[in-house]
Image (cartoon, rainbow, N blue to C red):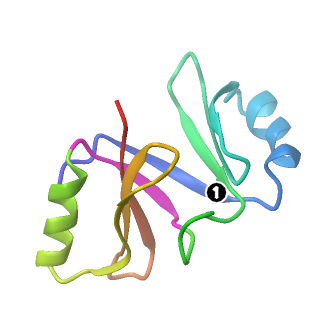
Amino acid sequence: MRAVRVTANLPVADIESARTFYTEFLGLSDEQFNLGWVASFASPETGAHVQLVTRDADAPVDSVISVHTPDVEAAYDEAQRLGYEIVLPLRTEPWGVRRFFVRAPDGNVINVVRHAD
């Protein structure tokens, strides 16, 4: 698998309540998307970024990071071949991403994702 970007998925109780800290104090003022339960913020100058997550709307558990890859199908096949636990099977979500969740040997759940072009 080839990771091209890794994004922290920070758990928050409410995205709107957390927004000011991340946008004004940390300078992540560019809201890349906001689905109500997950929102992504980035710095327009540096590209630093984070996702705030209240609870994944379509998965049994929340992930700690999102690993972006250009070939999510190959990553899924590799995870299965290596015997890693698939927590959420490979699927295309209504909001335009193709993803799956895999559990790392340390117990962390990773969202492996490819955004639609």
Per the image, label 1 sits on a secondary structure element best described as strand
User: Please, which residue is most extreme toward the right here?
Assistant: 17
**Residue 1, horizontal then vertical, whole percent:** 17, 55
Q: Is residue 11 above or below residue 46?
A: below
What is the quadrant of the C terminus in the image? top left
User: Please, which residue is most extreme toward the top here?
Assistant: 45
Give the magenta part as a residue range.
63-70
**Residue 68, horizontal then vertical, whole percent:** 35, 46
Instruction: Residue at 37% x, 57% y: name it.
Output: 99
Q: Is residue 96 above or below residue 113?
A: above
What is the three-letter code of the residue carrying label 1?
A: Leu
Front in this rendered view, residue 117 or 5? 117
Q: Residue under circle 1?
A: 10
Q: In this rendering, would 52 be left or right of 24? A: left
Q: In this rendering, would 83 be left or right of 103? A: left
Residue 57 among those drawn in magenta: no
Instruction: Residue at 34% x, 76% y: name it.
Output: 104
Q: How many marks?
A: 1
**Residue 5, horizontal then vertical, whole percent:** 36, 41
Residue 65 among those drawn in magenta: yes
